[in-house]
Amino acid sequence: MSFEEERKNLIESLKQRGYLSKPEVIEAMLKVERHKFVPKDLQGQAYVDTPLPIGQEQTISAPHMVAIMTETLDVKPNHKILEIGTGSGYQAAILAEIVKEGEIYTVERIRELAEQAKKNLEKCNYKNIKVLVADGTLGHRLEAPYDRIIVTAGALDIPQVLVDQLKDGGKMLIPVGGRFFQDLILVEKKDKKITKKNLGGCMFVPLISSES
Ligand code: SAH
């Protein structure tokens, strides 16, 4: 089976399992070639619904988690988005497929991964993704505020700096909990009030603050 056929089958199964329903997210996941975001020797597993190692003890998230997060984030074409935890760059690429007129700022603390992600993204010709090497727990103040913030590493709690960098009317998704298991939390800011909703369990590599 070709990579394209494998990708179509994966997306079909994500739809059937209820993870995917928004046409723009389905289109993005059909388009972005996940095998280009994993190490060569793991390309054969790129369309299995599982996280995969990408080096430096980090992982590319499972496709169903990318689907859930992208659907829930409710992304519009003109949004300015901040991602914390670039990893392979795959989630950023999915967002960029939807954000046609806006911009994606994605922050990674490990330089080697950021460099690899940049290469992965350049191959796919994305012009509106900026990969930054920094401690994402501080957000990215220069471009704040953001319409959407997506944290793809597990935090011990919600960094207030990130809440501050969210626009009024904005949404943030962040896994919050322990070292191995977290709850995916949707944070919304409306009329300067913050609401939090627990969307259920998830498993992410830890969000590591340079201060801890
Ligand atoms: N979204 C990625 C997967 C993220 S894995 C993808 O699509 O492939 C989580 C990433 O968060 C790891 O690469 C890890 O190095 C990074 N990370 C952990 N703590 C961080 C921090 N404080 N700031 C920025 N990146 C961080």
Image: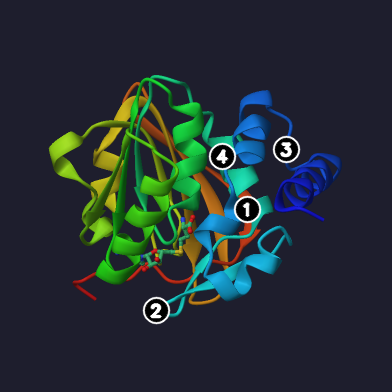
Q: Are marks 2 and 3 in contact (CB under 8 Å)?
A: no
Q: Which residue is mark 1?
A: 65
Q: Which residue is mark 2?
A: 56
Q: Earlier in the sequence, mark 4 or mark 3?
A: 3
Q: Which residue is mark 3?
A: 20
- Ligand 1 within 8 Å of disc 2? The answer is yes
Mark 1 element type: helix
Residue 21: image x %, image y %? 74, 31
Residue 48: image x %, image y %? 74, 62
Q: Earlier in the sequence, mark 4 or mark 2?
A: 2
Mark 4 element type: helix
Q: What is the residue that sits farthest to the right in this orientation?
A: 16
- Tell me which corner region of the image, top left, top right, bottom left or bottom right, holds residue 15: top right
- In whole angstroms, how far apart are the C-alphas of marks 3 and 1? 10 Å
The answer to whether residue 177 is above or below residue 47 is below
**163 sits left or right of 184 in the view:** left
Residue in view at x 52 percent, y 40 percent:
94
- In whole angstroms, how far apart are the C-alphas of marks 4 and 3? 9 Å
**105 sits left or right of 87 in the view:** left
Q: Nearer the viewer, mark 4 or mark 2?
A: 2
Q: Quadrant of the N terminus?
A: bottom right
Q: Which residue is mark 4?
A: 70
